[in-house]
Image (cartoon, coloured by chain):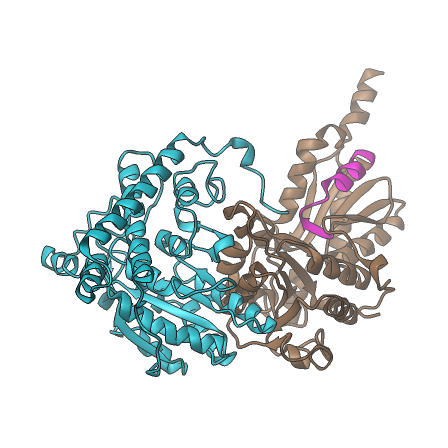
Amino acid sequence: MRMVDAIREAMRAELAADPSVVLLGEDVSVGGPFGATKGLQDEFGAARIRDTPISEAAVMGLAVGAAAAGLRPIVEIMFMDFATLALDQLVNHAAKLRYMSGGQLSIPLTVRMQAGASGAFGAHHSQSLEAWLAHVPGLKVVAASTPADAYGLLRAAIRDPDPVVIIEHRALYWGRGPVETGEAGIVPLGSAVVRRPGVDATIVSWSRMTATALAAADLLAAEGIQAEVIDLRGLQPMDTGTVLASVRRTGRAVVAHEAVGFGGLGAEVAARIGEDAFDALRAPVQRVAAPFTPVPAAPDLERAFVPGATAVAAAVRRTLARPDPHRRSLEEGR
Amino acid sequence: MLDAETPGALPRDPAGALALLERMQLLRAFEEKVAELYARGQVAGLVHLAIGQEATAVGVCGLLRPGDTVYGGHRSHGHALATGADPERLLAEIAGRVSGYARGKGGSMHLVAAATGFVTATGVVAGNIPLALGGAFATQLRGTGGVAVAFFGDGAGQSGQFHESLNLAALWRLPVLFVCENNGYAEFSPLSAHTGVERLATHAATYGIPAVTVDGNDLGAVREAAAVAIQRGRRGEGPSFVECLTYRLRGHYEGDPAKYRDRAELAAWRAKDPIERLAGRLAETGLVDAEAAADANRRARAVIAAAADAVLASGPAPASDLTTDVTA
């Protein structure tokens, strides 16, 4: 199944199961620009599947208010860049109403945001802003790298009692993969998964960069280096347990993401490793991220912007090329 | 403009009329107590009082029924009280005590009393307006006939969320009542420094929303306009907009010397005090005499005094609550 179809099937399943689930977004009745919502209005009606004006702030606020009143709205933000227009409602209201009310209110809201750089869409239709959202107490943030996870995480998000942002990378929409539908296919929020086991280094990634990390692991395997690839999936909450357990085994870590590096979630992962697994590290943690620029429009520049497998593989080699402090101390001890 | 078919603006029975007066007196006593506690250092933070604006809160909320919802802003102690929220728990919340509605985690600008339909207040000007649309959307989908009320000041009328919400509410015919409490000042500036539009109700016309501007210090005028608007919402006829011309008799926040207003202006508005005007009118009509009004005021003040005593005897917000209620 293609990821875009898995997303639609997840919404269809929850819309069918729970009459309080509603879908709001620009042009959702015709499927939006990528077809993720196509056919849902025919099946569930115009009262529950609502086209909205281009008013992200009011639509997000309406959804937050509806969630406070007991509905389970799904909001589609056509491009994550436009979430900037809805940040007051997401950050100041959706995220904080449970806390500010002392638990009187729940906001079971799901926000799907299509994101990432591909297709030369330029600076206003390509950003990866997950670090902004994961920084806000009260919001949950997830990113799928496979159709199965897109299905399972979305169903979990719709059922969750808190606001959940789902980041969907458009470059993955048409990729195919097996999807287990039904209850068994639901993926818990905040659970990382090891995509490829390895013993020499750990690569932590999410969204489209997971495929890049796997490609890097292939390159490294040809050199006899066995890299373990972790797909973080949950960015807030973050499954640091899976990351730390891996790093304790491999002693080396690379974090690879498409967002720019400064203040990105790679820094958070690196800091957690430094705080909790420093003793296991045989080399400094390396980050692979986009250069600190807006996303460029020209196809050649966009290709240069998005980190590739060779950059990830090079970062892994850097962790291996450094002197191994443990080995050195052993040698000195002889 | 709203049509003319309205129920009686003020109740014709003495008990009903007295209850409205007493509720306004309760709001006044509550906010004066907040000011007193703030001056004594027993309430901290940013506190915005609506003394002088009691007729709008009581005028609108007195017409609501269970299932209706109310969304306030930063100056919303009175809106919460007018829905019937417990004064002691509200005061405790404002004073940062464990017995508050949110055990002190919300505070003055973020009150929530869900049980009485006061869904939330917000510290972000106009941020509550889309939330009210959401409440209205839920009742529309469920067909319950409930309405949602957004209270906001004139300062909100220049924000994007205000205009987006008016458009969306009209487009979807949502049962929402926009109540603009136009008190003439957006923070420290007169409205004329923020917009060339004199009456914010004119914005509603742009979006095809019936609107009326009323004397916001006249409880009967507020009730008359709100009753029509609420009926429209219950009948599925969409949103309405009521602009209430009023005045806050204190500064933007406690501690604001409000030097931007002249004394003559303040004196003129003091003469239009909504509580005194209502008491005078009820006395004229013979519904409630001066003695009964004074008794009601004593009762309201006793309720607030007892609430304040209980709040001050209550414990502080406990540190163990710091990290609870972030997520479920």
Q: What is the span of residues highlighted in magenta in the rendered image?
A: A233-249
In the picture, measured across the screen, residue B48 lies left or right of residue A100, that is left
Q: Residue at x 31, y 51 (%)?
A: B27
**Chain represented in brown:** A
- Give the x, y percent position of residue A254: 73, 44
Near-viewer residue (A273 or A114)? A114
* Residue A235 falls inside the magenta stretch: yes
Which quadrant is home to the C terminus of chain A?
Answer: top right
Taking A155 as reference, is A136 above or below it? above
| Camera sees residue B195 | no
| Camera sees residue A164 | yes
- Give the x, y percent position of residue B278: 23, 61
* Residue A281 falls inside the magenta stretch: no
Taking B106 as reference, is B80 above or below it? below
Shown colour of chain B: cyan
- Give the x, y percent position of residue A315: 73, 46
Near-viewer residue (A332 or A254)? A254
Taking B78 as reference, is A238 above or below it? above
The residue furthest top is A334
Q: Residue at x 48, y 44 (%)?
A: B101
The residue furthest left is B264
- Give the x, y percent position of residue A21: 67, 67
Report how many numbered discs are placed on residues in the image: 0
